[in-house]
Image: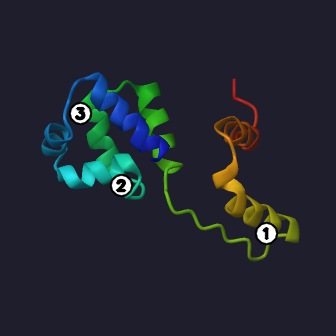
């Protein structure tokens, strides 16, 4: 499951809406919505994100957060380290080979470090 898929599923369940109901309202199939929630489909399009924001009547800050989650939710990431340093290539390969063995806490710690300081 992707971060975007998890958030969308949580919003839908909090509002007690089925996938079928939501899919019909935003103009996609229930199968596509299920695949998007479970991470079997990549990032949604900008237009679909806007439909989801409208469907749930999401306020501005929460909408920006949902857009950021969508940007970070491609389930099959490719990292091109061509032209970068050997250290960059090693880092990409280490992450690819070891991500499945990291704990949730370790992954969150790495993600926080890579995100950098929170803007004020």
Q: Residue at x 64, y 38 (%)?
A: 104
Query: Dot 3 lies on which element?
Result: helix
Of residues 91 and 27, the one nearer the viewer is 91
Q: Kindly identify which residue carries mark 2.
A: 45
For residue 57, above or below residue 5: above
Q: Residue at x 26, y 42 (%)?
A: 51
Looking at the image, is mark 2 or mark 1 nearer the viewer? 1
The dot on residue 26 is none
Cα separation, mark 3 vs mark 2, equals 15 Å
Query: Dot 1 lies on which element?
Result: helix
Q: Kindly identify which residue carries mark 3.
A: 55
Q: Residue at x 19, y 49 (%)?
A: 30
Asked whether the beta carbons under mark 3 and mark 2 sit within 8 Å of each other, the answer is: no
Q: Position of residue 20 (x, y in %)?
A: 15, 42
Query: Dot 2 lies on which element?
Result: loop
Tell which circle, 3 or 2, labels the residue nearer the N-terminal end. Answer: 2
For residue 119, above or below residue 41: above
Q: Kindly identify which residue carries mark 1.
A: 89
Residue with the most extreme bottom position: 82
Q: Position of residue 73 (x, y in %)?
A: 49, 50
Q: Residues within 10 Å of mark 2 (few under 14, many from 20)?
A: few
Cα separation, mark 3 vs mark 1, equals 42 Å
Asked whether the beta carbons under mark 3 and mark 1 sit within 8 Å of each other, the answer is: no
């Amino acid at each position: 499951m992707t971060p975007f898929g998890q958030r969308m599923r949580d919003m839908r369940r909090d509002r007690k809406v089925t996938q079928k109901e939501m899919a019909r309202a935003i103009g996609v199939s229930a199968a596509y919505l299920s695949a998007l929630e479970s991470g079997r489909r990549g990032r949604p399009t900008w237009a679909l994100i806007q439909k989801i924001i409208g469907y749930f009547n999401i306020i501005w800050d929460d909408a920006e957060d949902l857009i950021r989650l969508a940007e970070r939710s491609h389930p099959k990431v490719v990292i091109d380290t061509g032209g970068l340093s050997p250290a960059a290539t090693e880092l990409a390969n280490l992450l690819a080979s070891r991500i499945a063995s990291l704990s949730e806490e370790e992954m969150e710690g790495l993600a926080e470090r890579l995100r950098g300081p929170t803007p004020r």
